[in-house]
Image: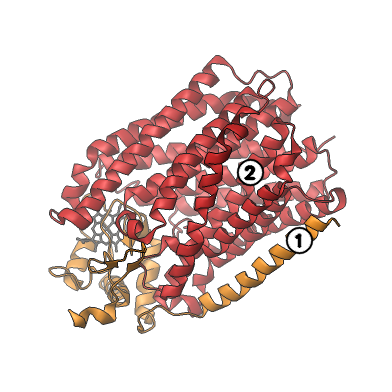
């Protein structure tokens, strides 16, 4: 084996070792704000969100599709909330298909949005933009400081 | 007789491209007429068809090209032609199963992998077979690997890992912690993209070394430096997709620092511009050469955009807008697809040395492809900028008013999307015919 091949294998080995450590740490790190684990009902709601591909039009934390609005804080936004969400589900507004959710399914989706809402804020209007290019986001547990 | 599996992959890839563009066009129509057929075929039904098909185009074409280079150009004896055939059959059947699962709404998965999660098993088996065949073949045949062999090997290995990671949500350990789960989901999709980029960028270096007849581009120290840089970005850079997700800040700091190393890539592109482009020997490979030129242009545009919005302060405004879409379209179409077409033209020349690649219509298609893509790209940037303005500056008006104000850009997006579809179809048709003929012979 040539000297350069040995060097390359060495570099890869180091990168892989770092990657393993990094993954173990990332997989064992919770979000910045401590929240309850998803309840069984919320998990059901999340599964409905997936089965019906709500993500292809809607976003959570700005990730997802662009045809509908972001739903991260739909649960707690003024003028919106559980009843508003339920009203939307089976109404079929604009490009949104008209679904046929049972009351139980609607509750599950609402529970999911409720727990997502507790994890943070998006869009994060009170984030601080720093000179280094860094953005210090405002966390859920900091809201009381307003 | 040589294995025909590589050609099967390429044909299958072109079919996926055609279908993917078709679904994309129909889906984008819903931006113009939101109510059109929305109960029968809502956007949410078409989008998975589109995304899976176009990703399949990239992945299958890369796979077929790599098999082809090993067997037909390097003339290695494949470790097992049977495994390659099996790989193809598994992917073909899984592809059909995925279409079925989308058609009948068995879509329990998540974005990019919406199909029934169980289907990831055959996909993984396919990749493992590819890996076995690849490493066994090279191990026997090559000493002192040029960088593209490393890149392909890395691409295959990381592809397996990140496809698996994209399904970690099936375990409660991840799923019940929303933020961790969501972060890992976007980590896996980001690195999944990085994995296929390893395959595709490896192909571009392979092509450059063959078209220039200069193996140095793939063996010098700089090439390896950039390979390691790319690999570090694949491993640790993903969190620039989730700067606004309340993960632990260190995850985002690492991503910011790692992402900024890509400025070195930009600097080197500018520094090497003339050297890399002009020396290419174009007589034998006029179209392969032209597509690589287009790649250079699109890399330049996209890397500037990507670098800018990997800075959190800029990302803050562009995240969640069509500017992100512009980036993903610019890279998958502008960079990946041009490299893959370059590979296809190179390949067809290997199979039929007399095949005239730069026919009049193909050249026209090439020009209209680039123009269409450019306007398509710009339409998305403007739509994204307007959405960002609505979100962070004006903050007035409802969501649907904002959407309505974007319609002119959606129209242009739609029309130039058709432009891309038609142009690529014109370019691909002679290739498709040639590969088909090869299969029959």
Question: For the point 61% across and 39% down, which residue is it?
Answer: B12
Mark 2 secondary-structure assignment: helix
The one nearer the camera, B105 or A42, is A42
Q: Residues within 10 Å of mark 2 (few under 14, many from 20)?
A: many
The label shown at residue B62 is 2
Chain letter corresponding to the colour red: B
Left or right, residue B74 beside residue B56: right
Chain letter corresponding to the colour orange: A
Q: Quadrant of the N terminus of chain B?
A: top right
Question: For the point 27% across and 76% down, which residue is it?
Answer: A114
The label shown at residue B83 is none
Left or right, residue B42 beside residue B95: left
Mark 1 in CB contact with mark 2 (< 8 angstroms): no
Q: Quadrant of residue B234?
A: bottom right
How many marks on residues?
2
The answer to whether residue B20 is seen in the rendering is no
The one nearer the camera, B252 or B40, is B252
Q: Position of residue A136 (x, y in %)?
A: 32, 70
Above or below — where is B66 with respect to A72? above
Q: Which residue is mark 1?
A: A7
Establish whether labels 1 and 2 are both on one chain.
no
Question: For the point 47% across and 26% down, which residue is it?
Answer: B423
Q: Quadrant of residue B14?
A: top right
Q: Name the chain under label 1.
A: A
Left or right, residue B115 beside residue B403: right
Q: Quadrant of the C terminus of chain B?
A: top right
């Amino acid at each position: 084996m040539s000297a350069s091949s040995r060097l390359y294998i060495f570099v890869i080995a180091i990168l892989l070792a770092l990657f393993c450590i990094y993954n173990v740490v990332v997989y064992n790190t919770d979000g910045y704000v401590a929240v309850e684990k998803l309840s069984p009902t919320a998990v059901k709601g999340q599964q409905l969100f997936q089965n019906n591909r709500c993500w292809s039009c809607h976003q959570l934390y700005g990730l997802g599709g662009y045809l509908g609005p972001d739903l991260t804080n739909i649960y707690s936004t003024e003028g919106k909330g559980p009843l508003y969400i339920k009203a939307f589900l089976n109404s079929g507004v604009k490009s949104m298909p008209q679904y046929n959710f049972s009351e139980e399914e609607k509750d599950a989706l609402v529970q999911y949005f409720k727990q997502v809402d507790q994890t943070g804020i998006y869009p994060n209007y009170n984030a601080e933009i720093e000179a280094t290019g860094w953005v210090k986001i405002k966390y859920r547990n900091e809201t009381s400081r307003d | 007789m040589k294995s025909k599996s590589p050609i099967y992959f390429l044909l299958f890839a072109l079919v996926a491209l055609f279908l993917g563009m078709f679904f994309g066009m129909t889906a984008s129509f819903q931006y113009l007429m939101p109510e059109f057929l929305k109960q029968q075929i809502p956007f949410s039904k078409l989008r998975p068809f589109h995304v899976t098909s176009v990703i399949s185009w990239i992945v299958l074409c890369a796979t077929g090209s790599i098999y082809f280079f090993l067997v037909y150009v390097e003339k290695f004896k494949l470790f097992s032609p049977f495994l390659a055939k099996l790989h193809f059959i598994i992917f073909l059947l899984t592809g059909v199963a995925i279409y079925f699962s989308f058609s009948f709404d068995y879509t329990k998965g998540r974005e990019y992998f919406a199909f029934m999660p169980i289907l990831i098993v055959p996909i993984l088996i396919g990749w493992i077979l590819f890996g076995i065949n690849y490493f066994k073949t090279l191990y026997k045949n090559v000493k002192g690997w040029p960088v593209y062999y490393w890149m392909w090997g890395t691409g295959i290995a990381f592809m397996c890992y990140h496809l698996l990671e994209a399904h970690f949500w099936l375990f409660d350990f991840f799923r019940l912690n929303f933020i961790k789960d969501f972060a890992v989901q976007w980590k896996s999709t980001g690195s999944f993209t990085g994995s296929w980029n390893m395959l595709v960028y490896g192909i571009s270096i392979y092509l450059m070394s063959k078209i220039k007849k200069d193996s140095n581009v793939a063996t010098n120290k700089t090439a390896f430096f950039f390979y390691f840089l790319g690999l570090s970005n694949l491993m640790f850079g993903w969190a620039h997709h989730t700067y606004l997700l309340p993960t632990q800040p260190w995850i985002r700091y690492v991503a910011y620092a790692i992402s900024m190393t890509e400025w070195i890539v930009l600097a080197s592109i500018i520094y090497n511009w003339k050297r890399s482009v002009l020396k290419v020997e174009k007589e034998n490979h006029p179209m392969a050469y032209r597509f690589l030129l287009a790649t250079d242009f699109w890399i330049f545009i996209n890397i500037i955009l990507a670098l800018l919005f990997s800075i959190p302060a800029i990302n803050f405004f562009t995240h969640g807008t069509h500017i992100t879409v512009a980036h993903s379209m610019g890279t998958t179409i502008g960079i990946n697809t041009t490299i893959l077409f370059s590979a296809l033209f190179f390949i067809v020349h290997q199979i039929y040395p007399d095949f005239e690649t730069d026919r009049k219509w193909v050249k026209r298609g090439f020009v209209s492809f680039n123009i269409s893509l450019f306007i398509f790209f710009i339409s998305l940037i403007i739509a994204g900028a307007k959405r960002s303005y609505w979100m962070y500056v004006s903050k007035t008006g409802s969501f649907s008013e904002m959407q309505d104000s974007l319609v002119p850009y959606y129209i242009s997006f739609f029309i130039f999307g058709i432009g891309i579809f038609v142009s690529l179809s014109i370019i691909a048709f002679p290739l498709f015919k040639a590969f088909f003929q090869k299969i029959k012979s």
